Image: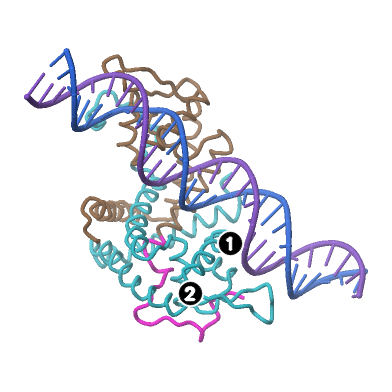
Chain colours: A cyan, B brown, C purple, D blue
DNA sequence: TAACATTAGTTTCAATTGTAACCACTACCG
DNA sequence: CGGTAGTGGTTACAATTGAAACTAATGTTA
């Protein structure tokens, strides 16, 4: 019932696309598997979505950011940030205060409660990451780091100049 | 106005999470950048969503699959497949015929038109992939391949056994 | 300082996605 | 056979997401 053993019916020519070898596809499957597993772990425990957790993760390291600065840091778009912020406010995980110097700007921070949650999630997230990393050698970890960097730059370049249109 | 030069206000302790170094996060950003860029290229030209294109990519190589077999091949869920299939039928990119041996089962194939589109998209997708790969050395490409394989297996293991709960 | 452009953030509405319930059919078991 | 369990696939409905319009404040120019 699997397609692996359909042998003769396979119709791949030289110009065919082998989805299972196609990097963008593999990245997508890998990324979804990993993110969903982790999100399930903290989502269930603390009522957090992925975007909300990302906002907390950034605010945990960089206090006093505005929504626009979160956009920069997270590569999320401003609507997603706005929604994450309002759900975090509802949970009392963050606080928001006006910047007197620019009354459009809102300064965000983890609340007491938010920091407690943050400090419980961090080790949990790190546990998943360590578990992933444990399947690699030191050497491979270094390689992966530099490879991701390169791919990221390349993909970034596409976005900036309609290069591939 | 960037957060890079906020220097002294950074509050990272030893147990903090450095999102920008956190593998799951980096994978997610990379994967989204890459997939979105490519999807934009073929989506605009041929009115295809990512799931629909994936279905075509598989049918291009493996004719006569059922929806369930597509689920296996693509790691998409059956609702997504069902929707992709119905949109592809609407576009006349695929054909569907009943399996007389099991009347629940529907046999899917690229139509004439679908195959034409497929054959125009394949090189386009490959161009993006090659462009990505071109930023790596041969050695790095091999490394990446094997690293992804390992990470995939690990993440798969999470799903199968509630290992990390 | 009036007019216009820009920036911060939110709201709205439509499209996409995920979960669960559902029909139709086949397989198994007494 | 008749009943029940399992499979293939779709539908329905709720939650998520994205694009664009909008409000409010600041900055800029004449």
Residue at screen point 20% across, 53% down: B161
Query: Residue drawn at (61%, 74%), measured in percent from left and top?
Result: A106
Q: Residue B76, can we see it?
A: no
Residue at mark 1: chain: A
As for residue A14 lying within the magenta part, the answer is: no
Which range is magenta?
B1-26
> Would you place residue A36 above or below residue A71 in this image?
above
Q: Position of residue A47 (x, y in %)?
A: 40, 63
Residue corresponding to mark 1 = A78
Q: Position of residue A7 (x, y in %)?
A: 24, 27
Q: Is residue C8 left or right of residue A16?
A: right
Looking at the rendering, which quadrant does residue B85 occupy?
top left
Q: Residue furthest bottom?
A: B8
Nearer to us in this view, B130 or B117: B117
Please tell me if label 2 and label 1 are on a single chain. yes
- Of residues B117 and A57, the one nearer the viewer is A57
Query: In the rendered image, which residue does mark 2 sit on?
Result: A59
Q: Is residue B88 left or right of residue C14?
A: left
């Amino acid at each position: 019932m699997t397609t692996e053993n359909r042998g003769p019916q396979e119709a791949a020519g030289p110009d065919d696309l082998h989805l299972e070898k196609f990097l963008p596809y593999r990245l997508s499957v890998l990324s979804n598997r990993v993110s969903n597993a982790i999100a399930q772990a903290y989502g269930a425990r603390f009522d957090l979505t992925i975007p909300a957790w990302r906002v907390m993760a950034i605010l945990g390291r960089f206090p006093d950011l505005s929504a626009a600065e979160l956009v920069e840091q997270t590569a999320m778009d401003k609507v997603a940030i706005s929604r994450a912020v309002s759900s975090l406010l509802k949970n009392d995980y963050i606080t928001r205060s006006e910047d007197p110097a620019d009354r459009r700007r809102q300064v965000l921070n983890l609340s007491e409660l938010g920091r407690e949650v943050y400090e419980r999630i961090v080790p949990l997230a790190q546990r998943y990451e360590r578990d992933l990393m444990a399947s690699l050698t030191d050497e491979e970890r270094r390689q992966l780091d530099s490879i991701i960097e390169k791919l990221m730059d390349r993909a970034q370049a596409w976005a900036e100049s309609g290069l591939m249109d």
